[in-house]
Amino acid sequence: MRALPPTMDFYERIAAAFDRLGVNRAQVGRETGITGQAVTQKLQRKSAVTPHEIQVYARHARLTVSEALGEGAVVLQLKDEQDLIELYRLLTPAQRELLFGVARQLAGTEAPETAS
């Protein structure tokens, strides 16, 4: 784990890391399709952060998503991941593909469909 105070929440943790690393919010914004000012506003809790934005912010802050979300999230995520792996192993290949399709949709990272 990185040396960040455990009492910080996601927004504070990311903003502190951005400041410490000199992260250009405009660059982060370009990657997420918003302005640098909008990134700052999101970190000030003025609008919601999407799962994709959380991933991008964490990467620019040089943190894992779990580290960015906080220690409690790490513990919950580990248990969730273990449960998911156990269930995944029970699925057929076709069911696994279906699961990945749904997961991509939920995470907002679904690849665009190709025209037939």
Image: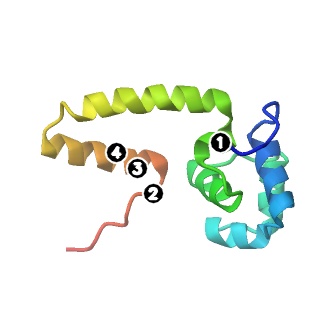
Residue at 58% x, 32% y is 74
Question: Residue 93 in the image: x percent, y percent?
Answer: 14, 45
Which numbered disc covers residue 97?
none
How many numbered tags mark residues here? 4
What's the distance in space between the residues labelled 1 and 3, CA to CA?
Answer: 24 Å
Nearer to us of marks 4 and 1 is 1
Q: Which residue is mark 3?
A: 105
In the picture, measured across the screen, residue 3 lies left or right of residue 77, that is right
How dense is the environment of label 2, judged by Cα within 10 Å: few (below 14), some, or many (20 and up)?
Answer: few
Disc on the earlier residue, 4 or 2: 4
Disc on the earlier residue, 4 or 1: 1
Which numbered disc covers residue 67?
1
What's the distance in space between the residues labelled 4 and 2, CA to CA?
Answer: 10 Å
Question: Residue 7 in the image: x percent, y percent?
Answer: 82, 30
Residue at 63% x, 69% y is 31
Q: Which residue is mark 2?
A: 109
Q: Secondary structure at mark 2?
A: loop
Query: Which quadrant of the figure contains the C terminus?
Result: bottom left
What's the distance in space between the residues labelled 2 and 3, CA to CA?
Answer: 6 Å
What's the distance in space between the residues labelled 2 and 1, CA to CA?
Answer: 21 Å
Say which amino acid is labelled 2: Thr
Say which amino acid is labelled 4: Val
Q: Which residue is mark 4?
A: 102
Q: Secondary structure at mark 3?
A: helix
Q: Secondary structure at mark 1?
A: helix
